[in-house]
Image (cartoon, grey):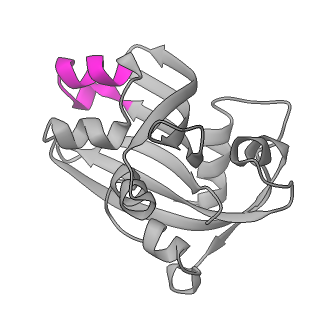
Amino acid sequence: MNPHDELLALTNLFPSSESLFLKAEHIPSAVTPEPYKTMLVHDHHMTVAMETHHRSPVDVRVLADKLDGDLYAREILLLKHGTDTVVQYGLVRFNLSYVTADVRREILAKQTPLGRILINHNVLRHIDLGAILEMTAGPGLAKHFRMPVGSVTYGRMATIFCNRQPAVDLLEVSGPL
């Protein structure tokens, strides 16, 4: 995977007049600063990492989504449960043909974070970490995280394999820590 090409493909799913990032640079996992390294450099669901770090369940807010047959994409925020505190921004592209009808229905209901759905339904899954990104916030990301434009945060690009098939491509950006 070329991280910049994949980042462009994911961000083009939901174009906006406000750029999300002024700059996104692929960095080695080994030089990712803490606590971002602990949050991002692993092969687990970010839902669990966010809940562990923030010591709270997380809620999902779907900003935009689209479905074309079995291909589903959404732009989301994860919020600390019961608050408006955004802990993660995400873009997801999911081939729903790799999950059951029940999992599909729950994903399309937009009430539960994707990672929690896959865990709750015991979907055989594996997560391949594609890249760690150092991201300089543009107006779009800065607005979501309530931080100044030009602030730096970190994210990751990954692929989730469901039942041994590459089903999900995603960008997950941590809120400032």
Which residue is more in the foreground, 35 or 158?
35
Q: Main secondary structure of the magenta part?
A: helix
Residue 70 visible in the displayed image: no
Residue 158 spot, x, y in % from top left: 44, 55
Q: What stretch is highlighted in magenta?
A: 95-108
Is residue 86 located in the magenta-colored stretch of the structure?
no
Residue 87 position (above or below residue 155): above
Residue 95 position (above or below residue 124): above
Q: Which residue lies furthest to the front in this view?
A: 82
Residue 11 spot, x, y in % from top left: 67, 40
- Please give left or right for residue 27 compared with residue 48 in the image: right
Q: Splitting the image into 4 quarters, where does residue 52 fall?
A: bottom left
Residue 113 spot, x, y in % from top left: 38, 36
Quadrant containing the C terminus is bottom right
- Please give left or right for residue 164 compared with residue 65 in the image: left
Residue at (74%, 30%) from the top-left corner? 15
Residue 81 visible in the displayed image: yes
- Please give left or right for residue 24 compared with residue 28 in the image: right
Residue 67 spot, x, y in % from top left: 47, 16
Residue 127 position (above or below residue 71): below
Which residue is more in the foreground, 171 or 87?
87
- Please give left or right for residue 175 compared with residue 96 in the image: right
Which residue is more in the foreground, 36 or 146?
146
Is residue 105 located in the magenta-colored stretch of the structure?
yes
Q: Splitting the image into 4 quarters, where does residue 85 fall?
A: top right
Residue at (17%, 43%) from the top-left corner? 163
Which residue is more in the foreground, 23 or 144?
144
Q: How many marks?
A: 0
